[in-house]
Amino acid sequence: MIPFNKPFISGKEIQYIKEAIESGLIGGNGPFTKRCHDFFEKRYGFKKVLLTTSGTDALEMCAMLCNIKPGDEVIVPSYTFVTSALAFVREGARIVFADSSTNTPNMEAEQIEPLITDRTKAIVVVHYAGVACDMDPIMSLAAKHDLMVVEDAAQCIDSYYKGRPLGSIGHLGAFSFHETKNITAGEGGLLAVNDESLIRRAEFLWEKGTNRAESFRGIVNKYSWVDTGSSFLPSELNAAFLLAQLESLDEVQRGRKAIWNKYHEGLSGRTCTLRMPYVPEYATNNAHMFYLVCPSSDCRNRFTDFMSDKGIKVIFHYFPLHSSKYFKAKHDGRVLRMCDFYGDTVVRLPLYYGMSDEDVVTVMEAVRNFCVDG
Ligand SMILES: *Cc1c(COP(=O)(O)O)cnc(C)c1O
């Protein structure tokens, strides 16, 4: 069976973890955490980043930093992972789900604007497959209505919108290093704080509601409880693992993009009714995922069975959140047509660093055969 995903391992993880152990510093916010922070601040020019134990944790910090109060409304795409919405639900937000656009599962200003009310506090944008939403119109809309913008950039490492790194455009950005992402720490995440007025508070929330990070830098001599928060920071063991991965980012990206491009070139014009992913001119492709859009859920089922018979694991993606078991009764009843469509029709092909040329060819041949026979 050709698997759908295999996490990348650089080979330096054990060495760095050993160094952390030998240094005696294995709690959070130590030297390896600092080196990961420096990596993001230097390479992408983020003003302030904080490693977290997951992308979900980074999103929970975003919800706290947006100062969400019970009853506040937050606009979130329905075609996304659970925690893009759940992080805000935990703070008492009422989620107003937005539809996707026709060209990509991303939402656009056009889908967001009619949903804004006096109670709207924030917009969560999700850059699906690491391909940017059209951020300029969304940021203007947010400025006009005085709304916070959170980028769920979980899939977006090393991807750009008009030359600007994803995660650096909204007030806040959240990345994930889950084992399914391009770079992984097993579980892990990163918060990017782009609005400078939120930096100080972000550090309090990160360190369990204390000013420990300031005491660490000698700004205050004894740390104490100053705010709400939680234990959002990962141990140095996770940070050491992550640093080993980050140092290989260029190699990982080269490898993944080569596979993505082979799929794209090899399948262009050969996928019959299966639609290829679309990358708008303002966006880059970070090869997080290669998906196809089937014309119907029936066709997708047939495609999945066909590929499975050929020993290839392909998988569906999101089940629309507005019709989930948890949320269905809370949804306001609007039909989210494109979201439902993607929920029924998106299927993802195997794509991971180190996937052999032979396997890529096998997958492409199977897709072409489906189009002829299926
Ligand atoms: C992976 C992912 C998350 C969650 O990240 P975790 O690190 O698994 O908590 C959130 N949103 C999106 C869009 C994701 O792809």
Image (cartoon, rainbow, N blue to C red):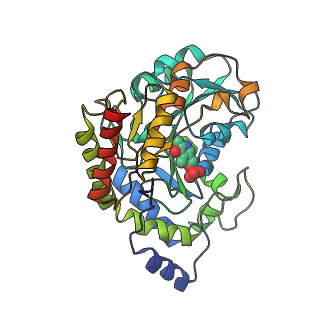
Which residue is at the front of the view, 342 or 115? 342
Q: Would residue 139 appear left or right of 262 to someone viewing this image?
A: right
Q: Is residue 223 visible?
A: yes
Indicate the position of residue 78 as horizontal and vertical percent values. 58, 29
Find the residue positioned furthest to the top.
Answer: 114
Which residue is at the front of the view, 349 or 284? 349
Q: Residue at x 41, y 42 (%)?
A: 130
Q: Would residue 14 appear left or right of 321 to someone viewing this image?
A: left
Q: Is residue 354 depicted above or below 92 in this figure?
A: below
Quarter holding the C terminus is: top left
Query: Residue 354's image quarter?
Result: bottom left
Q: Is residue 164 visible?
A: no
Indicate the position of residue 184 as horizontal and vertical percent values. 47, 60
Query: Residue 359's image quarter?
Result: bottom left
Which residue is at the front of the view, 53 or 25? 53
Q: Residue at x 56, y 37 (%)?
A: 318
Indicate the position of residue 126 as horizontal and vertical percent values. 50, 36
Q: Is residue 101 depicted above or below 370 in this figure?
A: above
Count of picture labels: 0
Indicate the position of residue 298 as horizontal and vertical percent values. 51, 29
Find the residue positioned furthest to the front.
Answer: 373
Q: Residue at x 58, y 83 (%)?
A: 24
Quarter holding the N terminus is: bottom left
Which residue is at the front of the view, 91 or 177? 177
